[in-house]
Amino acid sequence: SQAEHAVGDHASTMIRRMFEVDKFQRDNNTGGLILSDSADTNRYVEVSAGAVWERLNRNSFSAFDSDPGGGGDTFDTYKHVTSTFTLTTGVTQWPNTQYDDGADLVTMDSNKYANLWFYGDSDGEVAMVYGTAQYNKSALAELEEPPSSLPIRIQTHSFLLGRMIFQKSATDATQVDTVFETVFLPTQAADHGNLSGLTDDDHTQYHTDGRALTWLGTRSTTDLSEGSNLYYTNARADARIGLADLEDLNDVVAYSSLADGEVLIYNTAAGGWRHRTFAEAGIGDITEVVAGAGMTGGGSSGSVTLDVIGTASRISVAANSIDIDSGYVGQASITTLGTIATGVWSGTAVVWDKVNKTGSVLDDIANVTITTIAAGEILKWNGSLWINNTLAEAGISATSHTHTNITPVDSTDASSFIAMFDSATGDQAIKTDGGLTYNATTASLAATTFVGALTGNSSTATALANPRDINGVSFDGTANITVTADANTLTNTTLKSTVVNSSLTSLGTQAQALDMGTNNITGVGTGNFSGTLTAGNLESNGNITIGGSGDRIRRDVNDDLLIIYGGVTANQGGNVVLYGSTHATLANDIVLRSGSVTKLSWDDDAGSWSFQSLPVSMGALTATTIDTTGRLAGVAA
């Protein structure tokens, strides 16, 4: 039978077929949707504006630019984390170090290539999926097909824009392909150097270096016809070189019109060697020696001897000798002289340190006259000359002077006398005093009496010149003294009550009350404190027992309890036990005992009082509920 169709069924079926066969289509009239890498090396992503048809809906796609300083758009990326797709949002730069192996991201090896696949949504969003492998060459990366495993979002709501091929850590894509211009199959010609297997020796139509050398090793000149000088044997090379001229060399230029005596000189500007005369080459030459004024000899070849003969009172220069005339005094330009064997050098410019002084004597000086010199004589100026005189001739009386030899003994360990003078100026006689000495080794100054203030320590002092009283006892330093305590501080062995501060570390028995004011009494030992505490607090980290042979109170720090008892021990007489809040089993409980027998107890956990199986007699009892296992006697109200 023939199925019935409504009027709109045909259009609906066409729309359904269009969506299921080709979900998204670019508006080719508008164009655009071209994927690209940013022009600089910042790894930003750009997609040009365009439009996309979905069923019968035309959706505009705004230009996309992930440059924060440009469009400020961001894209999403999908990667596998333990084989599950994971979304990352807010991305601005395409990644350049990893690929996705289907389980997790894998860091690429150096110099490897990989793909990044970009998808667009009809609402203008962009998403990226990592490539699935790494490759040695970009041409191999071109062979990768779009990922077959995609997130649900891309499968249902996105369309492929294109892919980027990049090398690890590069900041610019090696290649960007758009799906609207490229079929993602290896259809375009690849760069030969970008192909794999180039290092494999499996192409018989070409020779590797090794194969070529092996083949050439089997060849000889008989295997190759000579032709027109295609190669040279050793003999032919020698013959060719023997017939060659200098001008045949490549770096010899401007070689023509040679003349005798020319030389080759290299010229950088000309680019080689050129022949030139001495003059052209800038080379000087002595062609002749001619005698002139003051010179004899001459010639233009052979050995030449020059004799320089000066005029009167000048210098004469002959072969191997120089003679200076005795009347010549113009020696200003002579700075060095050898030994002058004869004659007198009368120049005025002779410097003393240039003259050989060895062997000279004082009498050689012009204004010194020495005649019949004798021991002990002195030189005396007579107004024009220095002459030698005895002391008597010089007017000096030897008997009027007393001489004392002084020898330094700074390092001698001995007492030395100190020189003294009557006045600070003028001629003075040296004086000493046996009562004042100085020892340089010990740095000690000794004297019988010192006047004025002294500082430092005296190693020999045994007594004070003026004794001083210490608490009424005279002390001069000659012996130890015993000082009796001042009456205001100590009375025999008793510490006076008016003492405010004390450095005592222990006290004996106190005969009177000890008032500590606001200070604490701190015990550092295990001794007991007894007496009456009239004010303040008594604090202790240990056990506290209050009372004598009568009523007592004991605080047990270890068991966290307080016992008030009337006997001499905690288990005698009537007593009350109060358990602390931190007691292990009876926290906050109260027990009334006779000796060690409990009569009445408060159980804080149960919140009840308990009489320990004893008859209880009491007055009127008011209670909401009374629980008892014994006999209850009395008169009801």
Image (cartoon, grey):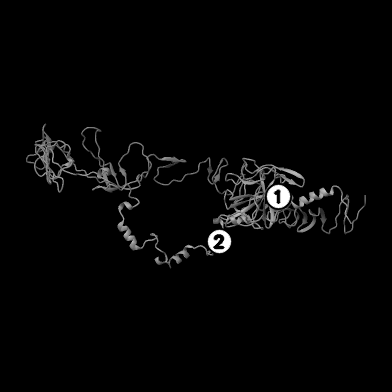
The residue singled out by tag 1 in the image is 159
Which residue of the protein is positioned furthest toward the front in this rendering?
227
Counting every numbered tag in the picture gives: 2
Farthest residue to the bottom: give it: 218
Asked whether residue 539 is in view, the answer is yes
Q: Which of marks 1 and 2 is nearer the N terminus?
A: 1
Residue 377 visible in the shown view: no
* Along the line of sight, the residue nearer the viewer: 275 or 166: 275
Seen as rendered, the residue at the extreme top is: 383
Identify which residue, 414 or 146, lies in the foreground: 146
| Label 2 secondary element | loop
Residue sitting nearer the eye, 336 or 174: 174
Tell me residue 151's x, y (percent). Answer: 71, 53
For the residue labelled by badge 1, is the local secondary structure a helix, a strand or a loop? strand
Residue 67 lies, with reference to residue 147, above or below; the image says above
The answer to whether 458 appears left or right of 410 in the picture is right
In the rendered structure, which amino acid carries the disc numbered 1? Phe
- How far is mark 1 from mark 2, CA to CA? 36 Å
Specify the amino acid type for callout 2.
Gly
Q: Which mark is residue 362?
A: none
In the image, is residue 211 above or below residue 78? below
Q: Position of residue 156 (x, y in %)?
A: 74, 51
Residue 273 in percent (x, y) is at 32, 48
User: Which numbered circle lies on residue 197?
Assistant: 2
Q: How crowded is mark 1: few (under 14 residues within 10 Å), some or many (20 or more)?
A: many
Asked whether the residues under the numbered discs 1 and 2 touch, taking CB atoms below 8 Å apart as contact, a structural biologist would say no
Residue closest to the far right: 636
